[in-house]
Image: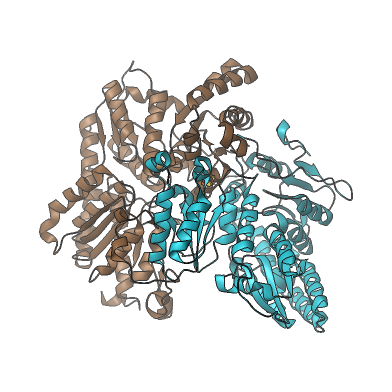
Amino acid sequence: MRLKEIPIEGVPYDQLRIEKVPAAPAYQPRDPELVPAANRALVVNPDRICMPIGAMWAVLGVHRAIPFVQGAQGCTTYARYTFCRIFKEPATIATASFHEDAAVFGGRRNLVEGLRNLVVRYWPEVIGVVTTCSSEIMGDDIGSFLKEARARLRAEIGPEKAEQIALVQINTPSFAGSHVEGYDRAAKAFLQTLATKRDTPHDRVNIIPGLLYPGDIREIKHILREMGIEATILFDISDTLDAPLEPPQRIPYYPPGGTRLAEIKEMGNACATIALQADAGGSGAVYLGRKFGIPAVAGPTPVGVAATDALLQHLSRFTGRAIPATLRAERGRLVDAMADTFHHTMMKRVAIFGDPDIVAGVTRFVCELGMTPVAVAAGTFSKRFGQEVEAAFAAYRDLFLDTPKVFNGSDLFEFEEYLKTLPRLDLIIGNSKGVDIARELEVPLVRVGFPIYDRFGYQKRPIVGYRGAELLLYEIVNALLDYRYPDDRTQQL
Amino acid sequence: MPLEILPSRRGHAVVKESDPPVLPVCGQPTVPGVISERACAFYGARWVLAPIPDVIHLVHGPVGCAYYGRNVRRKGYRLFSTNLEERDVVFGAGEKLYRAILEACTLVPDARAVLVYATCVVGITGEDLPGICKRAARVVGRPVVPVNAPGFCGASQAAGHDIAARVLLEHFIGKEAGEPVENGVNLLGEFNVQGDLDEIEALLEQLGLKLICAISGRASVATMAQAHRARLNIVHCRRTGHFLAEGMREKFGIPYVKVSFFGIEETATALRVIGQFFGATEVEEVIAQGIRAAKVAAAPFLSKLGGKRVGLFFGASRIGSMAKAFKELGMDVVLAGSQFGCQEDYQEAGNKVASGTVLVDDAHERELLEFVTYRQPHLWVGGTKERFLMQKLGIPFLVFPQENDPFAGFRGFVNLARQAAGLVSAPVWRLT
Ligand code: SF4
């Protein structure tokens, strides 16, 4: 391989060092007044998507469920496209197909007729009715529309079949929050609508994973299995958005897996609820706790040693099961890997961006690795985010030479401008939207979080749990090595 | 045909039985409750305008629209949005937009213009977009052009194509003085997908022609301002190109021809038509040479494709010429459809396919599913959204607009043959 051709995590070496491709055609010094996002009316390169897509993500994790998007076609099409790009899987999402008449007269007809059409063509078990900004501004009264839709279904397909279809209303005006909140609202809406009274308590645990990938959910399942714990995973996308290819299949195509409707109904009877991400899904846990008196914890995302320890302790405390030797061995292997690689990670200056839960989790992990986070940015504003990263810093502050900068709810433009003022940066950790920044700053990028659309396989590789952390660690170290030794002098290490 | 169809969809899918064929009903709003393959008007406008490099693309709407709008083209440009939030929706976002325009111009001082896209939210709240843009334009000293394409307007993304074309015509094309260029041509409706434009330009150069502006595959503000100097407009994708061509004919008296550069025969015809207009003498030679080379290069692939069934479902005005190209590959086109075709598109496609072929407008996922289950095509051609579903059903999929090499021109045809042959005989399908 020629020196020029060695790729560095998304940035081919030739572009990094030899002929750099500018990220934007015109890149000039900025008016310092306009750099902080708070000073601007404008958002430049946002690191968040709209609320409905978070809700759609959630609904796609339920068995035989279809999101029905109460809005114009685009809102659905883009979301499908986004899911396709991330998961390389089909995403069945129905549109209410708003046109001019709906924009003027409201979306009643679209919802009633749309649900009917969806049901007779797909026979879903669950329909998540996801509102959009247009529907919210017009003031669609979804509750009464749904009653009407249900009545129509009863008349057309018979009361029995009509009652079997669960309709969950999820209000997601996209101007009021990001995909993170959309997921959170979906979790709460599902539990509010479906989880029923506590009659026969059982010892299952509820897990709300949040915006994690199929690989992460598989890792969580692995941990649960090792501990011998039965669990309901609400929004289990591990099979629905990572389905095997086994033709021929029946139509309409439904991917295997997903959380069963019956399981969701039972979630009120569980012994505890753990939301792995406080911002994405936390409200669901809190709701169950309040309503049914189930112990609930929300966050932190189990990335790295301490956060995974915390998860295992919670699980152990709630179920009375001991942490098995196999998991202890996994922890040991992770710590061993950290010792092996420490001389490469220590004091490396790293910038992290993405969704608040993920960034907080990764931040703590890089601190554990002895790296110095110089800037951490959450694209979605979150109250908990500041506290979580500050807690991580506090635990390791003695190792830092200078104070990390925290951006909460800012955009990538501000983040990038800040990084440019730093004397040195070794690594960026974030989603695919960071490619331009990495290129501009000539720093390797490790892809973590949502969305990752420009590389294959990332949705299958966990970052949670001890094993996930180990994989993430290797990713980080190898990116640093690739960068440092692009000519592949591996034998010198 | 065993296609089970919602009553409201009757007439949207027809089987070709006669010549001229009965055409599917088209241009209608999508039925609610289906898994639609259509996008919104905003998308259409972005699709056309996004490649313009030296302007600021400012999406006036919630941040989601902006993010999605960025995805329409694989370009590393900056994304500007007013990021409408609750208070803006309640109290109006006019002032915010005004400030945003000024800020964007401060951040990118050498942008030649600002395009302000209005999305659904703004379309419903009904702001005085033109007024605000005019006011801002006076301050920033360059055109600030509203692109009023809320997602719900029109039946599909095609509405957005028209809106974008109108914007280009009114504000960008022919804005500077200039003498006609003797051998100058424009390409309208050519987006330079994976280098298609380079292939076409090379062919035009062989005829001694000079490409002034390709809208919008290579359309900067500067080149568009000079576009009226061309003597002929070549319309490639009709959906956007036709409107522009008509407008330029009215405004500047430039005649146009509608051609396609997909497939051997279509490319040859295109060159002939264009060559004739300019009285170019070397046309036949260029064609003969191109065909000879393409046939030799494509030969090894054709043997893998003969008699295989293929279904086409993508952007409207290309289905006709692509249907023909696939016939040249020796394949049987069993379905030709589009999300947003017009009469003319289906007319053309209908004339080019064999009887028994299904013509369909705005088919949604379930219809496509049924079709492939019953007809078992060997290859499906369409957009990324359908791709993974088809693959789950065991059907090889070719993404079009393509993702690797150019498909236009003679050399593009060879690429098409290679891709199709590779996909049809992919070992993975022997392992399932
Ligand atoms: S809100 Fe409207 S303009 Fe924006 S993506 Fe959705 S359909 Fe398109």
As displayed, is residue A164 above or below residue A206?
A: above
Chain A painted colour = brown
As displayed, is residue B36 above or below residue A47?
A: above
| Color theme of the render | by chain
- B108 with respect to A158 (left or right): left
Q: Residue at x 37, y 43 (%)?
A: A180
Q: Find residue B338 and report its horizontal and vertical position in percent.
A: 69, 50
As displayed, is residue A163 above or below residue A37?
A: above
Asked whether B206 or A82 is in front, the reply is B206
| Quarter of the rendering containing residue A23 | bottom left
Can residue B292 be seen here? The reply is yes
Chain B painted colour = cyan
| Quarter of the rendering containing residue A348 | bottom left
Q: Find residue B422 and report its horizontal and vertical position in percent.
A: 64, 63
Q: Find residue A419 and report its horizontal and vertical position in percent.
A: 28, 65
- A474 with respect to A141 (left or right): left
Q: Which residue is most to the right?
A: B19
Q: How many marks?
A: 0
Q: Find residue B347 and report its horizontal and vertical position in percent.
A: 81, 52
Q: Which residue is most to the left?
A: A398
| Quarter of the rendering containing residue B278 | bottom right
Can residue A88 be seen here? The reply is no
Query: Could you tell me which quadrant the C terminus of chain A lies in?
Result: bottom left
Asked whether A285 or A176 is in front, the reply is A176
Q: Residue at x 51, y 30 (%)?
A: A127
Query: Could you tell me which quadrant the N terminus of chain A lies in?
Result: bottom left
- A128 with respect to A220 (left or right): right
